[in-house]
Image: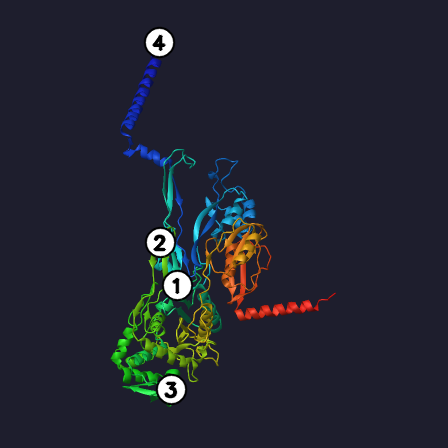
Amino acid sequence: MEARKHRNTHQGAFILFCLFGFLFSLLFARFVQLEWTGKADGQTLAVIAERQHQQTRTIKAKRGTIFDRNGAILAEDVPSYTVVAVLDPKMTTDPDHPHHVVDPKKTAEQLAPLLGMDVEAMERILTKKAKQVEFGAYGRNISFELKRKIEALHLPGIAFIRDTSRFYPNGMFASHVIGYAQKNAANETVGKMGVEKELDRYLREEDGYVSFAGDINGFRLPGGKERIVKPDNGANVYLTIDGKIQSFLEDAMNSVEKQYKPKKMIAIVADPKTGKILAMATRPSFDPNKRDITNFLNDAISYPYEPGSTMKVFTLAAAINEGVYNGNETYRSGSYKVGPNTIRDHNDVGWGTITFNEGVQRSSNVAFSILVKEKLGEDRFLQYLHRFHFDRKTGIDLPNEAVGQIRYRYPIERITTGFGQGTSVTPIQQIQAATAIANDGKMMKPYVIEKVVDPDSGKVVLDHGPTVVGEPITAETARKVRAILETVVTSEHGTGRPYQINGYRVAGKTGTAQIPSASGGYLTGRENYIFSFLGMAPTDDPKLLMYVAVQQPHLDVTETGAAPVSQIFTTVMKSSLQYLHIEPNGEKRMKAKTAQPQALDSWIGQPAASAAEQLKEKGYVPVVIGRGKYVEQQLPQGGDHVLLGERVVLKTDGAATMPDLRGFSLRDAMKVAHILGLRPSTKGTGYVVSQNIRPGAEVRKGDYLIVELAPPRQWEKEAAEKEKEAALRKEAEPHE
């Protein structure tokens, strides 16, 4: 019995020995095979091992910055962060160093005030059944300074996702020209409108990366190989837009929009010697930071319409150039027969027998019908329409340019085209054609992109310059046309009298264009027109050319359509001529341009008092925010090109406080709002006259800043009244 038991034990041991021996043999054979081939399941083991140890880190690139012609920033990438909260307890491996939110209530109480969020609302988010949560708009696009404040709280489970956001510092400012860029599903920033779209291939960036051998915690192993692919930053774009002139235009259009509530407005300011577009704006417009867009087309280049009497400028030029215009010759105004049709002057009855020069001044349709039909001839007039390029696009460097249509099939259309009815053109076509009048016969191609520059090498990768696209008339003709158009503004009969500018000679032509009705024919009613003016100054040697159109404004019973148009034209033209130091009274002398913008020093880390003093000495206006001693952030940033006299905002490392914004331009007020992380809201146009946060009060990111603006004269008046009140109070005080 006992012997049988030992025998069974030996048999079991032998079986186990054989089994383990077999398994060992298999493992050994596998080891030899792996060692010999270096592969497992068809994959190279060395590659697998390298992948497990290889670490890759992205090096973020920057989309190109868009500047105006003076170097002021119009669009740029700014660093931003998104706050996230990790709620999954499994993310914590060491209870003493938790990586998830342990105490939602305490976390909400400390974090919510910094984000400008309600504590209870944040606590509800932090108690959700999720692995990770965000805090909506409150936690997105936060600044580096706020990130550091949150990190200083050492809140378990609170982390950050680094990103960049596209920022437009001036808000609604040449918006249809600049356009906007937006992140797509792949988190790539892509241009969607305007220059952002047109030059997306130049502006677009490509991230780089660094790859290295690392340990399980992601740290680089000593002696490990490292590979670096540098980021490819987007190229910088410089526009022909002049920020000052654009500001004049935006302010004037805002004021007219508020007062007259028109359906549309279009305005373009150009340098007729070069074709550079110095300012361009339309209404309705939008803020590219908010993308509150109602019209995705730039009406200045994409909206063909019947121009009305501004077209008479080119009919007049054609007649003079062909030698068939005699301004002292007389004709019978009132009506003119074209086959079965009758063309009438805008007052229906005319002004009796008058000269052609007076007919131009009064904007007589009959005068221009005679010029086309009897003087020029319809075929020759058509040639001039082609010579002025009304049959093609200008080729301006912006997307979605449209082209008008020359309607010349029927006899009546050929005649009405001479005074701007039937045939349609775009505003930019009129600007291009008018450069020939202002530039002594040479017609210049309009453009808005000055150059594109590689930010790393400084190499100019795209360069635009003045281009003569035709010479439809002679220099002598151009001078004669300007002289006659000046009388449209100065003559007692002239329709352009509201466009006179004190101290400057202006030449131009008014327009009142009918609007086609959806049911056929044209709209009726005194407001249902596109009122416009095409003008240039000074007359003898125009430095600026401007077109303004206002569609269907709400007018008082005593007002004409010239009221809103002239308000824009005269304000912007006069301010721009003075800004460019164009001598009044038609003198040809032009002083040196305003001082060129200078690269701003970085004052970050410097004592705030010293930085402010040095900025004053350099000719800037410092605005110090906060109660700290050292500069923590500045706007404009170091390296930005800034004109002398501009405000430079310095934020200190202490508690953030609100400065007195009264007298600030909208642009300067937006600098303060951006650097403090406030949510701005504006009322009116011009300069700040009141603010909802009192000066000196502490502010936090996410607070709403509401400022009321008024035109310069109103602001100056209010400021003068306050100074007068202060002086009276001082006089009333008892004297020793």
Q: In this view, does 314 lie to the left or right of 249?
A: left
**Label 3 Cα neighbours within 10 Å, binned few <14 / some 14-19 / many ≥20:** few
Question: Considering the image in quadrants, where does the C terminus appear?
Answer: bottom right
**Callout in the foreground (1, 3):** 1
Q: Farthest residue in the right direction?
A: 736
**SS class, disc 1:** loop
Tell me: residue 159, above or below residue 293: above
Query: Which of the numbered marks, if any, corresponds to residue 539?
Result: none
Kind of residue sitting beneath label 3: Asp
**Callout in the foreground (3, 4):** 3
Query: Which of the numbered marks, if any, corresponds to residue 3?
Result: 4
Kind of residue sitting beneath label 2: Lys
Question: Alpha-carbon distance for marks 2 and 4?
Answer: 98 Å
Q: Nearer the viewer, residue 542 or 489?
A: 542
> Which callout, 2 or 4, points at the residue further toward the start of the chain?
4
Q: Is residue 270 left or right of residue 105?
A: left
Name the residue beneath numbered marker 2.
459
**SS class, disc 2:** loop
Q: Please say if the residues under marks 1 and 3 sit with CB atoms less than 8 Å apart.
A: no
Q: Quadrant of residue 267?
A: bottom left
Query: Which of the numbered marks, if any, corresponds to residue 240?
Result: 1
**SS class, disc 3:** loop
> Which callout, 3 or 4, points at the residue further toward the start of the chain?
4
Residue 474 appears in the rendering? yes
Name the residue beneath numbered marker 3.
348
Q: Nearer the viewer, residue 458 or 31?
A: 458
Question: Considering the image in quadrants, where does the N terminus appear?
Answer: top left
Q: Where is residue 673 in the image (x, y as percent from the top left)?
A: 52, 57
Question: Alpha-carbon distance for marks 1 and 3?
Answer: 44 Å
**Callout in the foreground (2, 4):** 2
Q: Residue at x 34, y 89 (%)?
A: 330
Kind of residue sitting beneath label 1: Thr
